[in-house]
Image: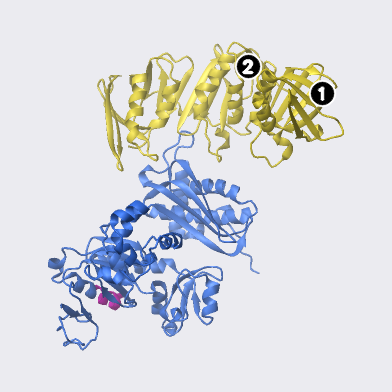
Chain colours: A yellow, B blue
Amino acid sequence: MKVTVERSELLKSLGHVHRVVERRNTIPILANVLLQADRAKLSLKATDLDVEVTDAIAAEVGPGGSTTVPAHMLFDIVRKLPEGAQIVLESSGDRAALAIRAGRTRFTLQTLPESDFPDLAPGDMTHTFTLKAADLKRLIDKTQFAISTEETRYYLNGIYLHAAGTAKAPTLRAVATDGHRLAQMELELPKGADGMPGIIIPRKTVGEVQRLIEDPDAEILVEISSGKIRFTIGPTILTSKLIDGTFPDYARVIPVSNDKELVVDKKEFAEAVDRVSTVSSERGRAVKLSITGGRLLLSVTNPDSGSANEELEVGYEADPLDIGFNSRYLLDIAAQIESEAAVLKLADPGSPTLIQDKDPRGALYVLMPMRV
Amino acid sequence: MPSFCRDCLVDASPQATRCASCRSPRLLRHDELASLAIAHVDCDAFYATIEKRDDPSLAAEPVIVGGGKRGVVAAACYIARTYGVRSAMPMFEALRLCPNAKVIRPNMEKYAAVGREVRQMMFALTPLVEPLSIDEAFLDLSGTARLHGMAPAKALARFAADVEQKLKITVSIGLSCNKFLAKIASDLDKPRGFAVLGASEAPAFLAPKPVSFIFGVGKVSAARYARDGFHRIADLQNASEVELMRRYGEEGRRLARLARGIDTRCVDADRAPKSVSSETTFERDIADFRVLERILWSLSEDVAARLKAKELSGLTVTLKLKTADFKIRSRARSLDAPTQLAHRIFTAARGLLEHAADGTKYRLLGVGLSSLASAAQADPADLVDGRRAAQAEQAIDDVRARFGDDAVVRGLAFERRDKS
């Protein structure tokens, strides 16, 4: 195999694939990236057996062929080569090595045979649809922060993507929760997605897809089977296993009859929460909201260091209420609110609170209060 | 010089060698006897003494309380100590020194019950009782002379006699003007002792002691101080506080003061515990994850039970392992919210254990919770599961409270009891 590629092209492409390679690997081949040269094209592929990313770039191909080399090391080498360099990758069949040449720099990397490289057989995809990159990114951005990291409830370690809404207005809905907060985002159901199974996309996959989206106007092809999902983003294809589990019936925790409505200026609110929570300790990040009439008093008391409070003018007409929340969770949600005003729908200090944009545009958040 | 009889509390004349009233030779005599009020009370060979009390046939035998061959000595009676057996010594070494010792498995519940009785009696002396462990505590008796109608020294002597009479165990008392000196004093006249160390005599008493005599100075730091010319406490006394601070920072200030017998720490009655933990040393080294996992579960249940009893919860789970070659490995993980549930403690610790169980052989496993919070903050309701996890464990606790600990056993911890 002998290929000549542009340094910037190869760097960008390696950037797409090398991240799925785990830093610590017990199976040596999984630390490698598969390089395949064929007809003016160099294909790259990396996997951790759960996620697989392939990419392709234009190349000047001499004799075709394929090999595998350590992914992170190749990425670092290419990164350190001078800008604008032409890189020649060459391997001869009889030696387990890949020569990398650029100008007067020369590397030789040990290789592992291509035949050892595992294939994440995608199987038959049952549903296919396209999404605008900006829409997919929005589905992810609005929900990703609420994904659980708790290993025992593995079925919460991802975004639950499914068809929802009404027959007249069907939606594609993304939901994530860690038990403390829940985030939901939906948009119009794309053609081809109706009847799709509800699937749980693992956290790592979600993060990779988010990073692969560069052009917001691009069209992304999404293919789904009951066990796998594949995203095609230009020349980059990401295939991932899905989480094999049942996502809990989240609809029953979304409050529908919370009648106490609190309207806050999002920026003012977030800044005040951030300020008063400075005195809270690592373990108890509770901020207390005391609401009376048009006034909201935010307060934090930390027996070890002191206390803080700040008063805000808000829109509130219901009975006075005291309720506590984890300040970090409040800030996470506030960061996703797009409009100037945020609406909190409250019931009582022990029940879930609904938080939305003044003009929701598909997103809603549920937050469990804390005892204060 | 004030003096009185420790047995009948009658004042004695300065020259007497025996009490004029009861003929006891146990006279206490000290210049500052009437004014000193900080005491350290330590039960003598606590576990071993209780075992001897409950089984008179052991009275003349060397008794060691501790775990099997692999464990360590939890307590050794004074007969066993004459062979060189000490607390915290590995059991095999203790048995080498004293092969005919009677080894008794510790019965912590029994000791804790006696410990509580001792503590109750301490509270009759003063509310300012700072327990250090099950069998020792600091007491501040300042300002109690009027209440008891006698100086703190006498009240303490009466307390020691009461403990002996009611609980049939003995205590040693150290009386001084601060915690550091009181703790030193209680060690001077063991067992069944009462030692007084006055502020004025403290510097001279401390001077010839090695620097490591000061608590918190271990082997490594002692070697460092020795390199700098500080071998004995006298060397510290000869250096100024400023000089020691310049050399050793905050620790230098502490050394300078303690070397002169100055300790300003208060007796803190409600010093909150910083962590709750449980650990065990195995009979044989273990590398198998499945076996370690099962032990981890029972330790997690133990920690959970103690958290619940103390109405506490904790946010940070720490796994502690000791390798076969005695290296300590410790790993910690913080939870989303404080917990007191065995299941949650176990799950977090199990994740840490998975990484540690890489074929290494371990001799000890422990799990603990720190960043403690109140029980009210524990295991908040969850959007997905509500309080089901907490309720399930509550149900198990209720069953156990009625039918015993073995009434419900988690599959993981269940060992088949074959008849063989």
- The residue carrying pointer 1 sits among few (fewer than 14), some (14 to 19) or many (20 or more) residues within 10 Å by Cα, namely many
Q: Is residue A178 above or below residue B375?
A: above
Give how far across and how far down residue B383 sits, in percent.
46, 33
Q: Residue at x 33, y 59 (%)?
A: B255
Give how far across and how far down residue B209 sits, in percent.
35, 70
Disc ID at residue B191: none
Say which of B401 and B58 sits in front.
Answer: B58
Distance (Cα) linking label 1 and label 2? 46 Å
Say which of A184 and A67 sits in front.
Answer: A67
Q: Amino acid at mark 2?
A: Asp
- The residue carrying pointer 2 sits among few (fewer than 14), some (14 to 19) or many (20 or more) residues within 10 Å by Cα, namely some
> For mark 2, what is the residue?
A194
* Range of residues picked out in magenta: B159-166
> For mark 1, what is the residue?
A2
The magenta stretch spans residue B355: no
Say which of B40 and A57 sits in front.
Answer: A57
